[in-house]
Amino acid sequence: MIELGVPYSQIVLAAEQTIYMVFVSLVIGTILALVMSVLLVLTNSDGILKNRYVFTVLNTVVNIIRSIPFIILMVFILPLTKWIVGTRVGTTAALVPLVIFITPYLTRLFENSILDVSKGIIEAAQSMGASYIEIVWYFLLPEAKGSLILSVTTGTIGLIGATAMAGAIGAGGVGDLALTYGYERLNTPLMLFTVVVLVIFVQIIQTIGNHFAYKLRNH
């Protein structure tokens, strides 16, 4: 790795930091997004739990956060990041803006996936006396799981790009490696290498997501 201008251990560390940021923020964001998307579907004007106030508030919050570019969001919530994790920089600190970024993004994707479920399935569940929780857990989510996996795949790829931008505030990862050792030192081979690594990450994730989504849709 001498031609790249950085030790091999530094490259491995950057890859590990990127995987850590993507995995942790994705897990937290997915859980929050599932809850929010289900609430949006249930409380909209055609939902089985119509509630205009809950829907309007939640829908507005999602729209506002999604309208803020990630690089601006990171800087804007630095005080919140400091309050939650005790620092404004570093890999763990990046988790706060990453979760806030990915949650509304996944919420919209999940909402669309759940809305695609046939209303006949919901009506059948209600006719069998299923509760609201049972309708969601045993009917809505299972029917939408193929599409939900593709949504998570898309969100994961978006997170990889976000972690690269998080390098601008010293979050570590492949993005920080590219900026600190590649761009600032005009190290073209390293810049090219980081691009290749990110492309490989994306291709692997997309392939895995497509595979499982196809299997579930044809189950």
Image (spheres, grey):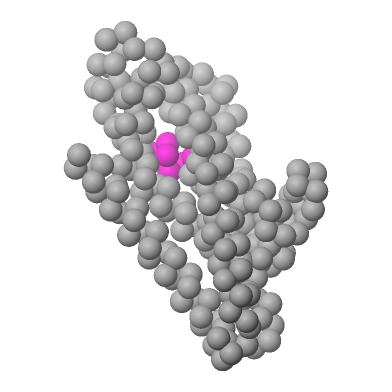
Q: In this view, does 10 lie above or below 2?
A: above
Q: In which quarter of the image is residue 218?
A: top left
Q: Quadrant of residue 147?
A: top left
Q: Quadrant of residue 180?
A: bottom right
The quadrant of the rendering that contains the C terminus is: top left
State the residue lying farthest toward the left: 218
Between 151 and 70, the one lying in front of the other is 151
Q: Position of residue 12 (x, y in %)?
A: 57, 71
Identify which residue is drawn at 29% across, 16% down.
125
Identify which residue is drawn at 59% across, 55% down.
21
Q: Is residue 57 above or below residue 130?
A: below
Q: Would residue 59 appear left or right of 153 to someone viewing this image? A: right
| Residue 153 shows in this picture | yes
Q: Which residues are drawn in magenta?
A: 107-112
State the residue lying farthest toward the front: 9
Between 177 and 37, the one lying in front of the other is 177
| Residue 76 shows in this picture | no
Any magenta on residue 108?
A: yes
Q: Where is residue 2 in the image (x, y as percent from the top left)?
A: 58, 90
Identify which residue is drawn at 57% across, 63% down.
16
Q: Would residue 95 appear left or right of 1 to someone viewing this image? A: right
Q: Position of residue 98 (x, y in %)?
A: 61, 51
Between 63 and 30, the one lying in front of the other is 30
Q: Is the magenta stretch mostly helix, strand or loop?
A: helix
Q: Where is residue 9 in the image (x, y as percent from the top left)?
A: 61, 75
